[in-house]
Amino acid sequence: MAEIKEVHSTLRKRAKRMAPGERRQQLNECAVRVFSRFGLGNAGHAQVADEADVSTPTVFLYMPNRQALIDSVLAEINRYLVDLVVNAAAGEETASGKLLAVTHAFAAATDSDPDYVKVFLNWSTVVHEESWPQYVSFQDHILALFETIIEDGIRTGEIPSAVNPIWGAHLVMGSAHMIAQMKFRGRDQRDINDFLEALIHGALLDRL
């Protein structure tokens, strides 16, 4: 494979040299910030170059067209959120504890990594764009993780057998939008904690 060499414009400051992997990660992180501000439909290579303080040709070197740029950003959002779910759930023993930990971790992410959450929210609503099939694939992956947790809880007797794992998973997945909106509105953390407790209890523990 040919070695990637960065392109620098003579019209702007020379960017700090980085290994190709480091540069790609930097550009991904900058692209997430740019997409959170401008949206999937408006962000482009020039804004990412400004954010990263590199030339526009350098961004094109790593993301050669607009679709490649979008795909790179969405892959980063996918990675971040899947890791969040897996890591948060891994620290708990019970099914309800796992899902509650995931919702708390997502709420915390709106403070620590708001750009990732904002791009996720945007991604989930662009139903007529080319990125929609990618969102459906991502959503199915998360839903499958939640369904497995609920099924395990049913097998152990923690969750009533009347609970449908598919709909329980959808309820938890759907709560992400409300959690983010509550956080961005500045709702008191105690209110958010109460909401998360009610969500998990209502979705998993009460018989209909």
Image: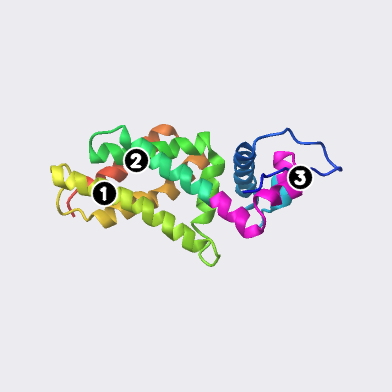
Amino acid at dot 2: Leu
Q: Quarter of the image holding residue 26?
A: top right
Q: Which residue in the protein does label 1 denote?
A: 148
The kind of secondary structure element at disc 2 is helix
Is 172 part of what is drawn in magenta? no
Is 71 part of what is drawn in magenta? yes
Query: Is there a contact, CB below 8 Å, between mark 1 and mark 3?
Result: no
Position of 91 relative to 10 (above/below): above
Nearest to N terminus: mark 2 or mark 3: 3
Which numbered mark, 1 or 2, is in the foreground of this view? 1
Amino acid at dot 3: Val
Q: Where is residue 71 in the image (x, y as percent from the top left)?
A: 56, 55
Closest to the observer: 160 or 47? 47
Residue with the most extreme bottom position:
128
Residue 147 seen in this snapshot: yes
User: Distance from label 1 to label 3 (Cα)?
Assistant: 47 Å
Q: How crowded is mark 3: few (under 14 residues within 10 Å), some or many (20 or more)?
A: some
Say the numbered circle drawn on residue 7.
Answer: 3
Q: Where is residue 158 in the image (x, y as percent from the top left)?
A: 16, 41
Nearest to N terminus: mark 1 or mark 3: 3
Q: What stretch is highlighted in magenta?
A: 49-74
Instruction: Give the residue at x 82% y 36%.
Output: 13
Query: Is there a contact, CB below 8 Å, between mark 2 and mark 3?
Result: no
Instruction: Give the residue at x 66% y 57%.
Output: 42
Q: Position of residue 110 (x, y in %)?
A: 50, 39
Say the numbered circle drawn on residue 196.
Answer: 2
Q: How crowded is mark 2: few (under 14 residues within 10 Å), some or many (20 or more)?
A: many
Q: Where is residue 67 in the image (x, y as percent from the top left)?
A: 61, 59
Instruction: Give the residue at x 29% y 44%.
Output: 200
